[in-house]
Amino acid sequence: MEVHVHTVAGYQGERLYTRWYPPQASSKGTVVWIHGYAEHSGRYEGIIQYLSERGWGSIAWDLRGHGRSTGRRGFITDVEEYLYDLTAVWTHWREKVGGSAVLFGHSLGGLIALRYRQKYSEIWTPAATLISAPLIQLKMEVPGWKKTLAGVAARFFPTLSLPSGLDPKLLTHDEAAALAYAQDPLVFRIATAGWFSAIQRAQAELWKDLPLLTEGHFLFLLPEEDPICDSQAAQRFFHHLPAENKKLITYPNSYHEPLHETFRAKVYQDIANYLDSI
């Protein structure tokens, strides 16, 4: 699979690792991917390859503090930093790839994609926004002591790192995929107090600004057995979404990562069918 690698300057000079995968068939458009927390864009090469063979190119990039991008691991002061970086990545690639583009966000990436659509549609309105297991509300229980410590540290020591407590077996029923995640050297297992505080603010603002999401096409892919992000909260958000062109696909037997589940071939096909329908 052909790939072009560029480093893009992000907010406050962070260096963002980005890749463009041209389509292997007649071009239908480009998917811009936003990965989840503590992982990296290289984990999406399976779906990228699948869509490339069907005419969809991809722009994949590592969030600041993730993967091969620079930045303190798992730290931001505000989600706005991710939004600025997304603008920088899209601005860098849009003239090179041409044609229409869609936005795909998983977990933290889903929260970022939705906030971007709420705040920066005048900069870029994708042809569609695809959301997988979004971090609208955590389902994974955070111990009370950790919440208290994070709240205090966010004010006085925002870079304080705490164990995330994420078990790879909560991501997928596929044991090989869970093991690959556990052994991935680009995956990290901490969260900072500043990041946690910034995410809580963004989640509150996401609900407050829900009425702004009136334009465009939306696809929500929700795993109903997700032990990390609250799929019921995501469904409530979807049902209150004011956009007329919206579609919901649920996966009753999926953990947090449908794209890495034992039945991911079906998820791939669902995504391809939707992209071809818009």
Image (tube, rainbow, N blue to C red):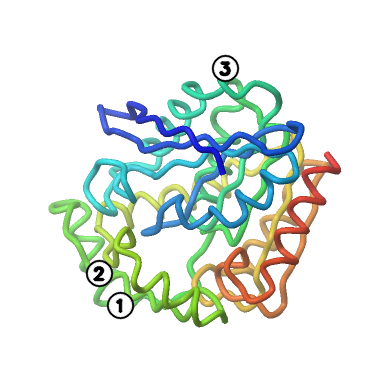
Q: Residues within 10 Å of mark 2 (few under 14, many from 20)?
A: few
120 or 179: nearer the eye?
Answer: 179
- First in residue order: circle 3 vs circle 2: 3
Which three-letter amino acid code belongs to the residue tagged 1?
Gly
* Marks 3 and 1, how far apart at CA: 48 Å
Location of residue 278 (image quadrant): top right
Given this view, does label 3 or label 2 mark the residue nearer the observer? 3
Label 3 sits on residue: 95
Secondary element type, mark 3: helix
- In the picture shown, does residue 114 fall above or below 160? above
Q: How far apart are marks 1 and 2 (CA)?
A: 6 Å
The one of 39 and 201 positioned closer to us in this rendering: 39
Of labels 3 and 1, the one closer to you: 3
Q: Which label belongs to residue 148?
A: 2
CB under 8 Å between callouts 1 and 2?
yes
- Around disc 1, counting alpha carbons within 10 Å, would you say few (fewer than 14), some (14 to 19), or many (20 or more)? few
Residue located at (41% from left, 49% from top): 201
Residue in the foreground of this view, choosing between 189 and 211: 189
Left or right: 261 in relation to 68: right
Secondary structure of residue under mark 2: helix
- Using the numbered discs, state the Cα–Cα distance from disc 3 to disc 2 in whole angstroms: 46 Å
Label whose residue precedes the other's in the sequence (3 or 1): 3
In the displayed image of the protein, which residue is found farthest to the top? Answer: 95
Placement of 45 over or under 172, stated as above or below: above
Is 231 placed above or below 136 here? below
Please name the amino acid that badge 3 sits on: Glu
